[in-house]
Image: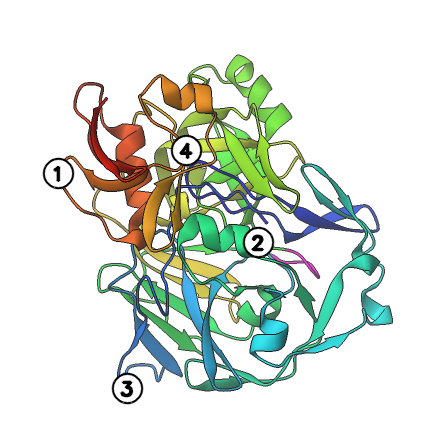
Amino acid sequence: MDIILSGVTLTAVYITAKDKMMSIIQKIIPATSSLLLISGCANIVQEEHSPYNNPVYSYSVSDHYSSYILVPVTINNKTYPFILDTGTSVTIVDSSLISDAGLEKTTLPAAYKNYFSDMTIISGKIDGEKLKYIRPPLFRIGDYPVTHNDIWIDMPLEKLREVTCENIRGLLGMDIINKFNWEIDKKNQTIRLFTDAPPIDEYPSCLTYSQVTFGSPEIFTWIGEYKITTNIDTGARRSYFDDAFLKDAPKKYPEQVKADPKIRNEIYIDLAGVQKTERVSYTVKNLELEGITLRNERISGDVLGKFAIGMSVFNNFDKYLISPDRSVICYTPSAEQPALAKKYRNIHIIAKDNQLMINNNDPQYLKSFGLQNGDIIIRINDNIYPVNATERAAELLSGTPDNSLRLDIHRKNTLHRIEL
């Protein structure tokens, strides 16, 4: 799977089975992202169960500053935030949960060995049999019990927590996602779970999808007349297509695909740590899905050759339903599609010690702005932002035109005002 937040990237672990590449975990994590926190930075608040269609659980995301879907998972009476990630085949839990939640280690079942034999991240390969595995406990999503699970992967997620200011303790994969129908109502800031698929007649359009074992849902997208089999990855902030395809696309479709200007200081984070990258993004003028044309969709190149739509696509919808029961994603389009923001600079932010901190940047690049790694952001254009708004803060640093951005920062016990 691939998570694109804003600025940095933790990338991909893939499974190969009989010449099929199927994603376990692929992440692009910008150092400027923020997910919904259940305890600490933000809150998930449970609502009363609605009689309409009888959801088994419903909760508010009114404090959600980011594009991502966070799910409250309760293990042994402790609740932790997990990312809803259709790009992750098998649920992944942070290593710290072994002691915190009393999880039991186990070995990889023989039936899984063919699928877990060859996993890859951008900076190298991982032997699936050398990964650590967890026997899934009885757990709850909200107050609804979830049973009959086979295997979870134990993987450290410290970098994910650091760059998001979210106490992320796991990635909820397709093994769990397929047990429910998920209604995300952005307009009313609520998420509802159904064990039986609710009616879809209120939605003007639906995307039908297919799915293979240990794979993400697949749909078709079109650029001009070119039809592309495309994964759905709710763990990716931005869509990503095969890098080789995108490099060639501006020649084949000059009116549809253009390479974005390169900006220095690009990095990603994968399981090996912080890595520099020369990744290039592209803007697709018209990306066609069933029932909708997305204007000026910005897409990242993927060196492993995957095609996937991320949360940037779902940001075009006021409400949508992910329904494994029907193998559809139904949606109500927003009245206006989000505008494509121009990027003026590329400054990465993390959340540390309950503060927004500039970090993981090329020191020479920062020097041109009068900034340093470790600077604490106090105000942006005279406004104070909560620590779980790292994604919003990063967007302001990136998208505010020159001579219009003022930063009040704290550096070595001294306050500074920086004008960019």
From what the image shows, is residue 69 above or below residue 104? above
- Looking at the rendered structure, the kind of residue marked 4 is Asn
Badge 3 marks a residue whose secondary structure is: loop
Cα separation, mark 1 vs mark 2, equals 38 Å
Q: Residue 279: where, in percent of width, then height?
A: 55, 26
Name the residue located 55 percent from the left edge and 16 percent from the top edge.
252
Badge 4 marks a residue whose secondary structure is: loop
The residue stretch that appears in magenta? 210-215
Label located before the other in sequence (1 or 3): 3
Report the magenta stretch's main SS.
loop
From what the image shows, is residue 416 above or below residue 86? above
**Residue, disc 3:** 51
Select label 2 or label 4 by which is in front.
Answer: 4
Select label 3 or label 2 by which is in front.
Answer: 2
Cα separation, mark 3 vs mark 4, equals 51 Å
Cα separation, mark 3 vs mark 2, equals 31 Å
